[in-house]
Image (cartoon, grey):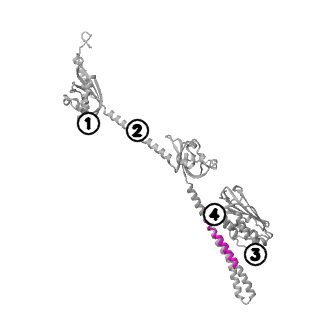
Amino acid sequence: MEENIISGEATPVNIGLTSIENIYQRMIDEVEDYAIILLDNEGIIRNWNKGAEKIIQYTEHEALGMHFRMFYLPEDRESKLPEKMLQQTRSGGRAKFEGWRLRKDGSKFWGSITLTALHDETNEVVGISKVTRDLSERKAAEDSLKTYAIDLEKINTELKKSEERFHRMIAEVQDYAIILLDPEGIVQNWNIGAQKIKGYTAGEIIGKSFEVFYRREDQEAGLPKKLMAEAIKNGRATHEGWRVRKDGTQFWGSVVITALHDEDSEIIGFSKVTRDLTERKLAEDKTHQYLMELESQNRELERFAYVASHDLQEPLRKIRAFIDIIGNNLQDHDLVSRFFGKINFSAGRMSELIKSILNYSRLGRFEHEMVVVDLNKELQTVLEDFELNIRQKNAKIKAGDLPSIPGYPLQIGQVFSNLIGNALKFTNQRPRIKITGKLVDADDIKELPAGNRTGKYLEISFEDNGIGFEQKYGNQIFQLFQRLHQKHEFEGTGIGLALCKRIMDNHAGFITAQGDLGKGAKFNLYFPYDN
């Protein structure tokens, strides 16, 4: 409405259809975000706006009169895509399509196209409007997102495969027990290695505490909980020690417990990796024992060499002294004869010492293999050897029935011979010797040396009524060349009981002595007994 200045009334103003069309055309021409193109029924370009020039790069002069197929890729032109879109628009009124289009410089853009049929008063199609929008940025974003999604899917697929392979790898490992524990130490998974090392199947152990793998004394000492606490504090805990299998047997396990955390660094469980190092442990223990024995033998050898030298020097010194006396008194036949007797006695003693030392040294070389030894038979053989001595001293010997055991027959005979010989020798009255045998538990042996095995032992006792000894010398008498009596009182070399001790060591057993001065002695032999 336009105001009439003279009358003051509003007077209608007729702009006219032509003016509206001009405004509408002007609006289309000025739009820059859309390519708005008018096509005739055959697809020839009849008008061109600024948006078309901006998006497709052709000027109006270059585009007018050209077929709109020039915007399409060669493959689209070859497939007749532009003609199909025209046909669809003419028959259906409109057609929509998204795809790659060509600019003047040959570059591509992603276009969203809408073709709309234009009709006259009789509803005949007189032209087609084509509206195109450049969605390259959106397309690039979608493609990037799609590529990312595809890549992510591939990564997830590979991750899943990797995770499956990882789980399969853990499940199939046989040399290590690889276990997942929850924060309370409850077993959550179980691999073949765990079953092989510990003996449990997955169904038997999942849901139970990992404390079942530890010995009772370790459980009572709180070792499993201490290892978990260490893993929480330091991230991991390592330990080596004896562990328990399902069947109750033990193995030497090397254990690594690692704390597992979530994104917030909260503990969600533990991984526990165990390796069975029993063979290594036994080899190390054997080596350590060998080195300890070697060190002990070296010390014993040093002492042996010193004492042997000392004891052998004594008869040699006497022999030399007697020879000097004889040399200075060759005319005194009685003196020469008397001192020749002394030389013969000293030489005999030296021979006895050398023989005893040789017997002792030979014990380092065991008989080839242990055999089943009938102890009754060995004892009877020894008693027959002492038959004359027993008869001369009117000795009374009482022996119980003894079992058969694995051993070295010659060495066992030597032990029996030394103990019976000592009982016959170290006495001032008619000898009484009692020999008995029985099975005893290791826990019931007060004198059980440290480090000896548990289980049962065969105890063989030799009890006599001889001169005995003070109990404070109960260990000393098993040392080389140790004598509790003067040589003029009782014969001997001081090697017999040391030989007995070494023989019992060879049989993984031990010997003990109990004495009461003037009332007798009791020697106990302990042989490991597994029957």
* Residue behind mark 2: 153
| Discs 1/2, front | 2
Q: Position of residue 355 (x, y in %)?
A: 67, 74
Q: Amino acid at mark 3?
A: His
Callouts 1 and 4 close, C-beta under 8 Å: no
Q: Is residue 360 magenta?
A: yes
Relative depth, front residue between 50 and 160: 160
Q: Position of residue 512 (x, y in %)?
A: 71, 63
Find the distance from the CA under tag 4 to the CA under tag 3.
Answer: 40 Å
| Discs 3/1, front | 3
So how many labels did they put on this image?
4
* Residue behind mark 1: 107
Q: Amino acid at mark 2?
A: Glu
Rendered residue at 36%/36% (across/down): 146
Callouts 1 and 2 close, C-beta under 8 Å: no
* Residue behind mark 3: 488
Relative depth, front residue between 154 and 347: 347
Question: 145 left or right of 251?
Answer: left
Relative depth, front residue between 254 and 9: 254
Q: Quadrant of the C terminus?
A: bottom right
Determine the secondary structure under disc 2.
helix
Label drawn at residue 370: 4
Magenta residues (range) = 347-370
